[in-house]
Image: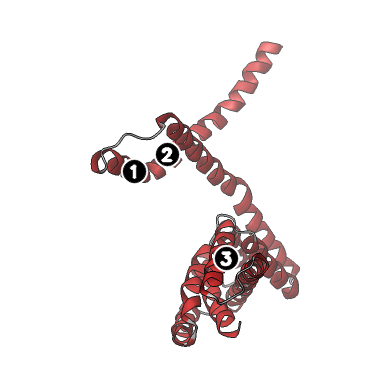
Amino acid sequence: MLPFAFESQRSHMTPLVGAAVGRFGSALRDLAPIIAVIVFFQVVVLQQPFPDLGRVLVGLVCVVAGLAMFIQGLEIGLFPLGEAMARAFARKGSLVALFAFAFGLGFGTTVAEPALIAIAAEAAGVAAEAGAIAADEAARQAYAFNLRMVVAVSVGTAIVLGVLRIIKGWPLHRFIISGYILVTVMTAFAPVEIIGVAYDSGGVTTSTITVPLVTALGVGLAQSIRGRNPMVDGFGLIAFASLTPIIFVLVYGMLA
């Protein structure tokens, strides 16, 4: 009985092991160009050995394994969850609940984004050195916190606007073109100290958690609404999430 049970368990584990090995190989292939560039410039251009090669190799294995597990987690967890929640909200028929979820999703995933925390702290330090704010810790923390809140609110607003676009079937390019025209005009009037921070804020909002959840939300919602094409209407939320922070931070710079 025991040998049979062991063989049965092993037969179930074999596909899982094969999938894990395949995912690891795919992650290694995706990282191969980066690895090749680093090796080429370190060995051929700089002509120096790798410092502590053992630690570098261990770190590389950890990166590849982490990327493989992250992608696997997206496929088996976050993507299905986002699409299922979008369909559930569409069946529920409550726009208020859908918009509240969209805003909360954008705000929550952005406010804790490490890249945003880093750029807000750096911007606060530079602003203190330039004399734009008081050169003390409390002022720097307040400036960084306010900047993070502005960006998080902007992303939440962007997701709500993107969801409304999917529901109404409005063309995406009109929003994007109009938004960047507005950004261009605002740039001419915004303080020069805030322009770079505003443009960078648009890039740091597309985090590893925001992108899969928001994409799954858009695709699932487009699949649930009659007359919507997931390829045409389901994508574009990330473009909103990258555009609106620029506008909001420029306004914040002109007001504050």
**Where residue 105 sits in the image (x, y, percent)?**
66, 64
Kind of residue indicated by mark 3: Ala
Colour style of the rendered protein structure: secondary structure
Kind of residue indicated by mark 2: Leu
Around disc 2, counting alpha carbons within 10 Å, would you say few (fewer than 14), some (14 to 19), or many (20 or more)? some
Position of the N terminus by quadrant: top right
Residue in the foreground of this view, choosing between 187 and 107: 187
- The Cα atoms of the two marked residues, 2 and 3, are separated by 33 Å
**Where residue 142 sits in the image (x, y, percent)?**
67, 70
| Figure quadrant of residue 169 | bottom right
Taking the spot 49% from the left edge, 69% from the top edge, the residue there is 232
Residue in the foreground of this view, choosing between 51 and 224: 51
- Give the numbered dot on residue 28: 2
Which mark sits nearer the N-terminus, 2 or 1? Answer: 2
- The Cα atoms of the two marked residues, 3 and 1, are separated by 29 Å
**Where residue 17 sits in the image (x, y, percent)?**
54, 29
Judge left or right: residue 125 versus residue 108.
left
Residue in the foreground of this view, choosing between 180 and 164: 180
- Give the numbered dot on residue 38: 1
Around disc 1, counting alpha carbons within 10 Å, would you say few (fewer than 14), some (14 to 19), or many (20 or more)? few
Which mark sits nearer the N-terminus, 3 or 1? Answer: 1
Is any part of residue 184 visible from this angle? yes
As drawn, 94 above or below 72: below
The residue that mark 3 highlights is 120
Taking the spot 43% from the left edge, 29% from the top edge, the residue there is 54
